[in-house]
Image (spheres, rainbow, N blue to C red):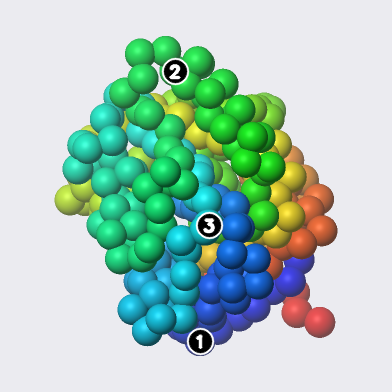
């Protein structure tokens, strides 16, 4: 893994956003996988600023978000679709028909997951994926367990994950939905390039486990060790446990 360490979260966000903008400039038809949660908010702010300065053009790019809460419609203010509108989509020039999302309100969750996997495949898979990491090692909403699922699926969110998401809903974990739809690990690991961002003391232990620990479904992010093109964008606190050459 290519590990890049910066003094602060803001510096991480600026550098990562500049990297993503350069990737889009090099290949305007880029297929991007995008996360939600707390970690990417500053990256999205930086991307929006780049667009405002005329340094980012997403008009030919395609995006697929990695997950969505089950039971929420796209226009629900608690949905990840609404989150993306607030933090990125309304600030950049992505074409609406090139934005893809799970429909959390779909009556048949399994059919919706099958539809989404087919859409990712039809787009040719991911050129670049941006990931966060949960305190328990989840990527997208692939939670720790005895095994990981390759395809998109319905998942029950762990207590730890719901607690981590609480700041998005007024610091009340009980308001975080119990279940979600998520991409499986196969399309993530098949991406040409993966970028993972992590900040703060709460991510230090899991970042160390992801990089130096065994590859195990107990830490889904550890499977990134198998990928040939991963960059970790970390602040000094999140990187404190890493062995540096």
| Residue position for label 2 | 109
Location of mark 1 (residue)? 7
| Quadrant, the C terminus | bottom right
Q: Is residue 79 above or below residue 213?
A: above
Q: CA distance from mark 1 to mark 2?
A: 42 Å
Residue pictured at 33% horizontal, 44% vertical: 80
Numbered circle sitting on residue 182: none
- Asked if residue 63 can be seen in this view, the reply is yes
Residue drawn at the location 28% of the way across and 35% of the way down: 74
Residue 2 lies, in percent from the top left, at 74, 71
Image-quadrant location for residue 69: top left
Contact, mark 1 vs mark 2 (Cβ under 8 Å): no
Q: CA distance from mark 3 to mark 2?
A: 27 Å
Residue with the mark numbered 3: 61
In the image, residue 183 sits, relative to residue 80, either above or below, namely above
Give the percent coordinates (x, y) of residue 152. 57, 28
Q: Earlier in the sequence, mark 3 or mark 2?
A: 3
Q: Quadrant of the N terminus?
A: bottom right
How far across and down, in percent of the image, does residue 148 sit?
A: 66, 31
Instruction: Tell me if mark 2 has few (under 14), some (14-19) or many (20+) residues whose alpha carbon lies within 10 angstroms of its own.
Output: many
Q: Earlier in the sequence, mark 1 or mark 2?
A: 1
């Amino acid at each position: 893994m290519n590990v890049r360490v910066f003094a602060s979260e803001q510096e991480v966000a600026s550098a990562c956003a500049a990297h993503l903008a350069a990737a889009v400039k090099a290949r305007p038809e880029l297929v991007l996988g995008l996360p939600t949660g707390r970690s990417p908010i500053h990256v999205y702010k930086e991307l929006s600023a780049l667009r405002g300065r005329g340094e980012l053009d997403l008009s030919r790019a395609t995006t697929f978000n990695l997950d969505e809460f089950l039971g929420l419609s796209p226009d629900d203010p608690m949905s990840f679709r609404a989150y993306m509108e607030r933090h990125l989509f309304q600030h950049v020039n992505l074409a609406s028909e090139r934005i893809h999302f799970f429909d959390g309100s779909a009556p048949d969750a399994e059919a919706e997951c099958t539809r989404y996997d087919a859409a990712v495949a039809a787009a040719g898979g991911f050129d670049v994926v941006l990931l966060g990491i949960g305190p328990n090692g989840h990527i997208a909403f692939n939670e720790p367990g005895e095994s990981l699922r390759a395809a998109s699926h319905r998942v029950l969110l762990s207590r730890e994950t719901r607690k981590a998401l609480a700041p998005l809903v007024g610091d009340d974990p009980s308001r975080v939905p119990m279940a979600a739809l998520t991409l499986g690990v196969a399309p993530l690991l098949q991406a040409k390039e993966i970028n993972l961002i992590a900040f703060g003391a709460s991510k230090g232990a899991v970042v160390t486990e992801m990089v130096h620990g065994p590859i195990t479904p107990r830490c889904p992010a550890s499977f990134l060790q198998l990928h040939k093109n991963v960059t970790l964008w970390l602040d000094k606190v999140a990187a404190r446990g890493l062995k540096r050459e």
